[in-house]
Image (cartoon, rainbow, N blue to C red):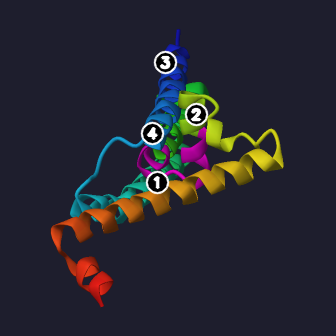
Amino acid sequence: MRDLPGLALIALGCGLLVSGAIKRRARARPAGAIRPEFAAMGEIVRPVILFAVAFVALKTAVFYFLFDGARFLSPLTFGGFLFVLAAYAAWLVLATQRPTRGTVQTAESQLAGPRPEDAPPAEPRLAESRLAESRLAESRLAGASAAHDLARGGRFASAARE
């Protein structure tokens, strides 16, 4: 019965770690733009909070051992409290740190599945023919634009008359 709060604190810490992992995956997906001043504020405040959590954990440990905290808290409850502080610090880092580029690509590939442009071409000639088709389409587009300009009497029309 005396260890029941310790077990509850350990369960709370595990919940924080799972929540941080879920939040990290959610941040890997592009969600929208955040205002730059809020992003900068988050980058500045996170180390301050982590320092405060470490300071509270250190003070708690010193006073627990200095004033015989085992009279009031079981070692499991004390360990559970320190675990919650460590789990909160980990949650804060997971929830606020920007994901690396590889993490974003991994999350996108898990959501979207394989993309056809990532697959290697079946034959080298196929890739070359696709490149040739795109160049042909660009030249047709440029020719159509010049013909349209010529019909309207634009700059190409004056160059053609000369």
Disc number placed over residue 21 in the picture, else none: none
Residue 83, quarter of picture: top right
Q: Is residue 13 above or below residue 124?
A: above
First to last magenta residue range:
92-106
**Amino acid type, mark 2:** Gly
Secondary structure that dominates the magenta span: helix
In the picture provided, is 75 more to the left or to the right than 15?
A: right
Q: Quadrant of residue 121?
A: top right
Name which residue type carries label 3. Answer: Ala
Mark 4 vs mark 3: in front: 4
* CB atoms of marks 4 and 3 within 8 Å: no
Cα separation between marks 4 and 3: 32 Å
Which numbered disc flags the more N-terminal residue, 2 or 3? 3
Q: Label 4 belongs to which residue?
A: 29
In the rendered image, residue 120 lying in the magenta stretch gets the answer no
Q: Is residue 34 above or below residue 111?
A: below
Mark 1 and mark 4: Cα distance apart in space:
11 Å
Mark 4 falls on what kind of element? loop
Q: Position of residue 2 (x, y in %)?
A: 52, 14
Q: Residue 96: within the magenta?
A: yes
Residue 136 versus residue 153: which sits nearer the camera? 153
Whichever of labels 4 and 3 marks the residue nearer the N terminus, that label is: 3
Labels 2, 3: front one: 3
Looking at numbered disc 1 in the image, what kind of residue is underneath it?
Arg
First in residue order: circle 1 vs circle 4: 4
Residue at the spot of label 3: 8
- Image disc number at residue 79: 2
Q: Which mark is residue 98?
A: 1
Q: How many marks?
A: 4
The CA distance from mark 3 to mark 1 is 31 Å
Pick whichever, 78 or 161, lies toward us: 161
Q: Position of residue 149 (x, y in %)?
A: 24, 68
